Image (tube, rainbow, N blue to C red):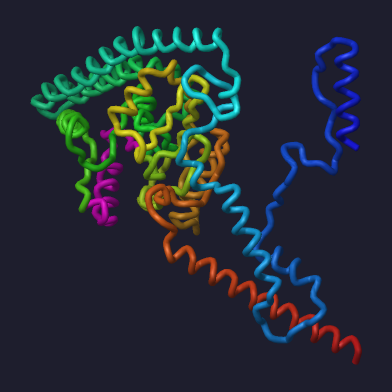
Amino acid sequence: MYISHLWEWQCLCCCINLVPLSPPSLPPSLPPSGIIAKELSSLEQEIQELRASGTTLSSEPEFEMADIMYFCRRGMESIVDDEVTKRFSAQELESWNLLTRSNYNARHISLRLSVLWGLGLFIRYGFLLPLRVTLAASGIGLLVVLTTIVGFLPSGWLRTYLSEKIHLMSYRICVRSLTAIITYHNRYCRPTKCICVANHTTPIDVIILANDGCYSMVGQIHGGLIGVVQRAMVKSSPHIWFERSEVKDRHLVAKRLSNHVADKTKHPILIFPEGTCINNTSVMMFKKGSFEIGCTVYPVAIKYDPRFGDAFWNSSKFGMVNYLLRMMSSWAVVCSVWYLPPMSREEGEDAVQFANRVKAAIATQGGLVDLLWDGGLKRGKVKNTFKEEQQKLYSKVIYWIGSLKVISITMNYSETM
């Protein structure tokens, strides 16, 4: 029925040679965004619906063959639409931006488009890339040299003042090297103390936020160029760098964070609780360590515009230098940053619940998908504890349905008496 109406509408538009403002509304029976509409329901509800067609009622909770259909369907849905694996690959674009092609748009090839693509290559690699590399080298060089010099000054207001100015200047030069166009929203909620948490898409999230204010960084000690920058930064301002062996000691990490937060003269700590980069489409599980300290948390949502360049860092595919060259050879880095109101841990709320509440606020503001999966699945497998939780949940469902059957049989028996 709807297809015939749509065909008549298109024919009418062609006949009168007008461009329609909007297509006719879909009938209520058809979903607006696809053929299959997935309804959200719990495991208990779906298994109970599968068993509702049965005619036998057992007084004892037990496994039924109909339950297999539920797990088979969920398994097929996970294979067809894997909501975890696709978060660790580049976001697919609907149109071509002269950087990459999707499989759909690869068939639209012409001489004029090829000439335009060649011109874009010359602009990006022949003009923009050398200029951006020069700016990036200048920003990193100034940061290393000036912070080392300031590190020799005695602790006091002069050292703190110069350190803030040097960090802001260096980060802003690095932002210019990426041709970053950043829109900051709700700047009155900008973090001034305690902990700042944000979703993580790329290592340049650090300079995107530090371009608007000073933060104390938290991370592992690296070697190479990153290690040189880390050692220079910590000489002039209080940053927290951990050895890999210390990161596994949660109590030691929490103690160092607590000591930093307790000092009101220090800058807010910038933390990315996901622990890995996600492809700018969703927010995955926040590690609870940052939320166990018991201080105020300032959430920040970051959203990049993929039409001008893919900001996602696939660390399993590209190294840091290769990734930065890809970013500097893109058109620009366009993003929006939302500072959210500070959030505190409520009474009776544990660290996991607090982390999920902060994550949900970031996902809602940034227009991202809120996922409960751990970002560690990017490199590892599902933990056995998660599988055991699903088994325990199904065991509770069996017991719950069996109890309902016992109650139903008892009520029917009492009514007949």
- 161 in the magenta segment: no
Residue 5 located left or right of residue 183: right
Quadrant into which the C terminus falls: bottom right
Quarter residue 33 falls in? top right
Identity of the residue drawn at 90% across and 11% down: 16
Q: Main secondary structure of the magenta part?
A: helix
Left or right placement of residue 247 versus residue 400 in this view: left
Task: Give how far across and how far down residue 205 sits, in percent.
Answer: 38, 30
Q: Nearer the viewer, residue 189 or 362?
A: 362
- Taking 139 as reference, is 413 above or below it? below
In the picture, measured across the screen, residue 218 lies left or right of residue 87, that is left
Residue at 55% from the left image edge and 47% from the top image edge? 83
Image location (x, y in percent) of residue 256: 24, 47
Question: Is residue 237 visible from the viewing direction of this image?
Answer: no
Locate residue 121, reporting x and y percent. Answer: 41, 12
Residue ID at (67%, 70%): 67
